[in-house]
Amino acid sequence: MDLFEHRLQQLNATDSPLAARMRPRTLDEFVGQEAIVGPGRLLRRAIQADRLSSLIFYGPPGTGKTTLAQIIANATQAHFWTINAVLGGVKDIREAVDLAKERRGLYDQRTILFVDEVHRFNKAQQDALLPWVENGTVILIGATTENPYFEVNKALVSRSRLFQLKSLTPEHLRQVAQQALQDPVRGYGDRTIQIAPEALDHWVNIANGDARSLLNALELAVETTSSDAEDIIHIDLEIAEASIQQRAVLYDKEGDAHFDTISAFIKSLRGSDPDAALYWLARMVYAGEDPRFIFGGCSF
């Protein structure tokens, strides 16, 4: 690393969004997902022992998939290599594999390959990765918001342990906010900030289990609110409402949630359950679904 790269890393550390700066670095800082990384759980033991097999994390945005991968990167003695499936391709896979072979041969060091948005790899790209996962040249850690049983190569899925991450609870989100308010280096611990209880309640409700959404709202509120004569930043409900405009809804028109929702809507209609039908209809309308798709789904 040269001086320019070092300076760039320093700038990124201070200028990055709050959600990026507050990303947990260790399992002790990680909030939520006790079912898979709580004390004594398999994944936690594997990370602490640095004995990982290939993994795929899946779940809604803002639940900690990429964060867990970075915690593993901080804890492992293996070489950690990252590819974003949106930007990468077969060439990047080959580069990672070549590097993994070199490090294994020269230093007897394993290589962990983290693929973010792994479901975005097409069939050819996933097939190019498969043999190197199968023979252990690389240990795959994939992250996806989609159901890997439908969106990821079945052979890759069969060679990986799957862990589903759930939306964070309101208590988890409050803990995330508290961490950001108390950390003097990465968060706002060096400022005096008073948040009205109803303002925090609003953020927790609208964030809908997404820690990133909550931290983005907190950052916008703090950075755009002037302090008073005593250098205190007051965040009331009005400011909180202005900083987060719409409830986060898991709904991707090209993903599983899209079809799961219309399916639930149709089943509710068939089952003569008006309350459930109105609920699923409201979710689709709120997410901006095309009315023609909704009415087309009713043609049964």
Image: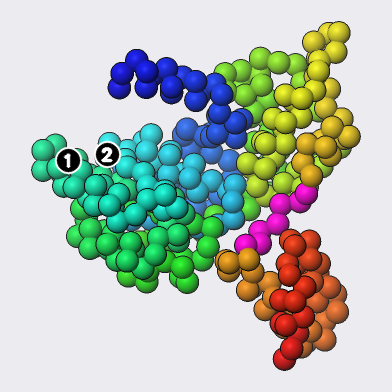
* Residue placed under numbered mark 1 in the picture: 103
C-beta proximity under 8 Å, tags 1 and 2: yes
The image position of residue 171, as x and y in percent, is: 70, 43
Which residue is nearer to you in this view: 208 or 117? 117
Report the Cα–Cα distance between label 1 and label 2: 8 Å
Residue sticking out furthest to the top: 229
Give the prevailing secondary structure in the magenta stretch: loop
Q: Residue 190, located in which quarter of the rendered image?
A: top right
The image position of residue 292, as x and y in percent, is: 75, 76
The image position of residue 40, as x and y in percent, is: 45, 47
What is the number of the mark on residue 79?
2
Magenta segment: does it hold 249?
yes
The image position of residue 107, as x and y in percent, is: 14, 37
What residue is at 63 percent from the left and 73 percent from the top?
A: 259
What residue is at 77 percent from the left and 80 percent from the top?
A: 295
For label 1, the crowd category at 10 Å Cα-Cα, with few meaning under 14, some 14 to 19 and many 20 or more, is: some
Q: Is residue 156 above or below residue 167?
A: below
Element type at mark 2: strand
- Quadrant assignment for the N terminus: top left
Q: Which residues are magenta?
A: 246-252
Q: Residue 103, located in which quarter of the rendered image?
A: top left
Residue sticking out furthest to the bottom: 300
- Quadrant assignment for the C terminus: bottom right
Magenta segment: does it hold 296?
no
Q: What amino acid is labelled 1 in the image?
A: Arg
Element type at mark 1: helix
What residue is at 75 percent from the left and 62 percent from the top?
A: 288
